[in-house]
Image (tube, rainbow, N blue to C red):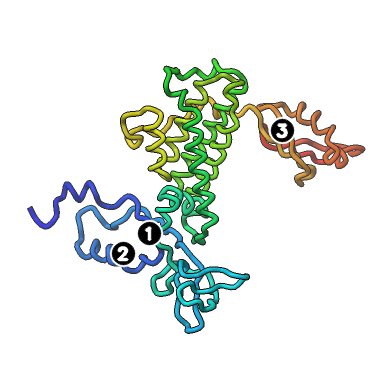
Amino acid sequence: EGPFNEKEMDYWMPVDQYIGGIEHAILHLLYSRFFTKALALKNISEPFSKLFTQGMVCHSTYKNYSGDWVYPDDIEIKDNKIYQISTGEQVSEGPSESMSKSKKNVIDPSSIINTYGADAARWFMLSDSPPDRDINWSISGIQGSWRFCQKIWSIVVTNQNLFTKDINEKNTENVNKTAGEFLKKTHEHLDSITKSIEKFQMNVAIAKIYELVNLISKFDNKKEKDDSSLKEAIIILLKVIEPMIPHLSEECWEYIGNKSSIIHEPWPKIKKELLKKETVVIVIQVNGKRRGEISADINVSEEDVFKKINSLKNISEFIESKKIKKKIFIPNKILNIVV
């Protein structure tokens, strides 16, 4: 049959997406390209279809007076000075550099996992900066991530009763105004999270998840009495956090009564009808220069926009007592007044 199984090769090659640090650019990438070219594989000219280069995890470096590198776990701060715990020597702090064993500026992952959990560590690393940039490791950052994970757990525990009774999802037309706005915001966040993940913008997705959690936390269900909308939002939340904090999402998923794993669940469906904009921001220009903006109903007329800006001082002062030569109106976007 030969050295390679053609069916297997067709299925696996080329690799859809390669993700790796810049330190792999020579060894992994160069060698894999060399072997792909040297073997002259049928229908495969490159080993990878796409490449994404991730940033490095960085930490401050430390040296004692003997010139030896010191582990971060072996230092303590007293009276604004840094000391090595094992020797009592004073230590100098160097620049933050990518973690390496040679400079000992590494953190033992087991101690972080034992204290805060793997999910909190993963959440911090994804949320701190865009994945193609370096991140600086900090205890305060991971503590914040741990607290956020607790907040999600608290939301699920507090609202567990929603999942012990049969609540059918409502049509969007059948919810009250406040719940309707809540659902609209929920699906706007879902849409943004989905697009951000597809673009590898994990930190942007996480920022929107923060907003989604705050939205759910502030929804007063005792007042609104809309179990369906709140239940829908919590299910969406658990599904969108699964790629980042899988242990917590799995635990929450089981806690609300599901027997199968959340990894078998489809990605939440975006209700496109809720993404339709009802208002738009229209930029107002005078002689091509931006002078302000107004919020108006979608598809508002040029006449109505012009009436509205006459009451705005920062715009009217540029056009009052002046002859308007023409108005250039781009619906839902710009009104440019030439005087």
Amino acid type of disc 3? Ser
Q: Quadrant of residue 306?
A: top right
Q: Residue at x 32, y 63 (%)?
A: 29
Q: CA distance from mark 3 to mark 1?
A: 44 Å
Q: Return the residue found at the far left.
A: 1
Please state if 60 lies on the left or on the right of 26 as rendered.
right
Pick the front one: 202 or 318: 202
Task: Give the mark nearest the N terminus, 3 or 1.
Answer: 1
Q: Are marks 2 and 1 in contact (CB under 8 Å)?
A: yes
Inspect the image, locate mark 2, and give the three-letter code of the amino acid beneath it. Answer: His
Give coordinates of residue 39: x percent, y percent. Answer: 19, 62
CA gap between label 2 and label 1 equals 9 Å
Q: Which residue is mark 2?
A: 28
- Compared across the picture, whether 175 is left or right of 238 comes to right
Closer to the camera in the image, 148 or 195: 148
* Left or right: 141 in relation to 110: right
Q: Quadrant of the C terminus?
A: top right
- Residue drawn at (70%, 36%) of the image: 282
Indicate which disc residue 295 carries: 3
In this rendering, the answer to whether 94 lies above or below 46 is: below
What is the x, y in percent for residue 147? Answer: 52, 46
Q: Which residue is mark 1?
A: 20
Q: Please state the horizontal and vertical placement of residue 325, each as a whole percent of the image.
A: 83, 38
For residue 77, what is the image quadrant? bottom right
